[in-house]
């Protein structure tokens, strides 16, 4: 059974930075992975995704240029560097993994097979 555990969330002022990490129980090298977030009262939304071997990355327009997704398959880990944070970035952030092979960009919740428990990010104004 695949397990994903996020860490690195916290409280930060607007304009600040945070780095989220996701540790996977399995070998990630063949997985498509992503980050999603969910604010109170809102649906879970796509943030960023990365293909196998880091060949492709894709970002939501709302975070493009501020967030960077990366992976270290030697450590079975996924990261999200978040810079220039805004209050509207406040949400619970989730790590997700798709173990089924794909060549397409995957941004939908049901594209992913496994999820972490989430880590809270709060950006104060």
Image (cartoon, helix red, strand yellow):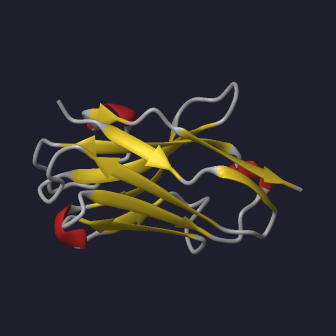
Q: Spot the residue most to the top.
A: 41
Q: Residue at x 28, y 37 (%)?
A: 111
Q: Measured from the top left, where is residue 57 in percent x and y?
A: 34, 67
Tell me: 51 left or right of 95.
left
Tell me: 29 left or right of 38.
left
Q: Give the quadrant of the C terminus.
A: bottom right
Q: Residue at x 18, y 63 (%)?
A: 52
Between 49 and 10, the one nearer to me in the picture: 10
Tell me: 11 left or right of 96.
right
Q: Measured from the top left, where is residue 120 in percent x and y?
A: 63, 41
Q: How many marks?
A: 0
Between 124 and 67, the one nearer to me in the picture: 124
Q: Residue at x 27, y 69 (%)?
A: 56
- In the depicted structure, whether residue 47 falls above or below residue 70: above
Q: Measured from the top left, where is residue 55 in percent x and y?
A: 22, 73
Q: Measured from the top left, where is residue 75 in percent x and y?
A: 24, 63
Q: Give the quadrant of the N terminus.
A: top left
- In the depicted structure, whether residue 93 falls above or below residue 30: above
Between 55 and 20, the one nearer to me in the picture: 20
Q: Residue at x 21, y 64 (%)?
A: 73
Instruction: Tell me which corner region of the image, top left, top right, bottom left or bottom right, holds residue 30.
Output: bottom left
């Amino acid at each position: 059974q695949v397990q994903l555990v996020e860490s690195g969330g916290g409280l930060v002022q607007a304009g600040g930075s945070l780095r989220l990490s996701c540790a996977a129980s399995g070998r990630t090298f063949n997985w498509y992975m992503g980050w999603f977030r969910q604010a109170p009262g809102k649906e879970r939304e796509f943030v960023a995704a990365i293909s196998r071997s880091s060949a492709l990355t894709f970002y939501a327009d709302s975070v493009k240029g501020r967030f960077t997704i990366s992976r270290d398959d030697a450590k079975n880990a996924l990261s999200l560097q978040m810079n220039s944070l805004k209050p509207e970035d406040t949400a619970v952030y989730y790590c997700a993994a798709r173990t089924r092979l794909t060549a397409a960009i995957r941004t939908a919740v049901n594209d992913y097979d496994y999820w972490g428990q989430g880590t809270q990010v709060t950006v104060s104004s």
